[in-house]
Image (tube, grey):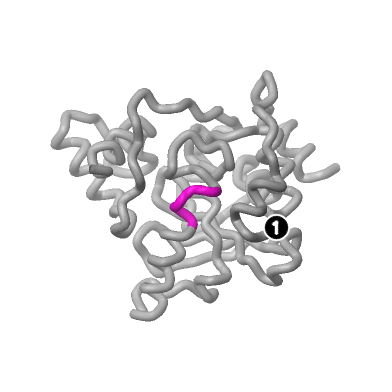
Amino acid sequence: MSDLSVLTRLCPPPQPPPAPVDWGRVEAELGMRLPEDYKQLASVYGPGSYGGDYITIYHPHGVTLYVNLTGPMPSRIREHLQRDYEQGVYPAPYDPPHLFAMGGTDGGQRLFWITEPENAPDAWRIAVNEDKGPNWATYEGNLTAFLVDALSGQMDFPQFPNLREIPADFTPAVKPPFEVGDPPTREPVNTDDIRNWARANGFQVPSRGRIPREVREAWEQSHTA
């Protein structure tokens, strides 16, 4: 049984199916081939989040610039990694040019493809970094297998302390009721800063764990000007 078959049984995809993706155009825009498992995953599920909105995978039809695979975020995250790599601040274990950001979590972690070898995307592995910290982990498999292990509770990554608590579900993305501007060029903010901002603006947020989606979106809206 394929990883995608296991995932769809564990985590049913949305109905009706999402709009088809023009993968030729997407790969031409990115200037690289994409893993087949990702293209199948994105075609079946569409844009959205897994595990109670905890894990978001970037998609060519992403509803904001923050979650669009062909948007500015992957290159901007790579620029931050390159600068940190050169300055010795939270250095990545791989050369930043070989890391392509394709997802993240409500806890602030980032998901990357390790794009080596460049001409064999189906052999790319997954790298995960912690929020504003030096620790990285490598998953020896593709993205779909990663999601299966994460949603079935078989994964134990120190970067993902809340995996045992997330449900095995998928939430289709909904376009926000406000216009989300171009993502800021500064570094991703520490999640503690989001919590402090949220409390100062009347939101209820837990002291630990996942920051609710509506709080993160409100923070992003207020900081895109």
Determine the residue located farthest toward the top in the rendered image.
Answer: 16
Q: Which residues are magenta?
A: 70-74
Where on the picture, by quarter, is residue 208? top left
Question: Toward which corner of the image does residue 186 lie, by quadrant?
Answer: bottom left
Q: Quadrant of the C terminus?
A: top left
As for residue 23 lying within the magenta part, the answer is no
219 or 134, nearer to the observer: 219
The amino acid at mark 1 is: Arg
Q: Mark 1 falls on what kind of element?
A: loop
Q: Nearer the viewer, residue 63 or 25?
A: 25
Magenta part, dominant SS: loop
Image x and y of residue 112, in percent = 55, 59
Q: Which residue is mark 1?
A: 33
- Relative horizontal placement of residue 47, taking residue 108 as reference (left or right): right
Q: Residue at x 74, y 31 (%)?
A: 9
Q: Is residue 45 above or below residue 96?
A: above
Q: At which x and y percent is residue 1?
A: 85, 42
Q: What's the residue at 25%, 49% (across, down)?
A: 192
| Residue 162 horizontal side relative to residue 88, left or right | right
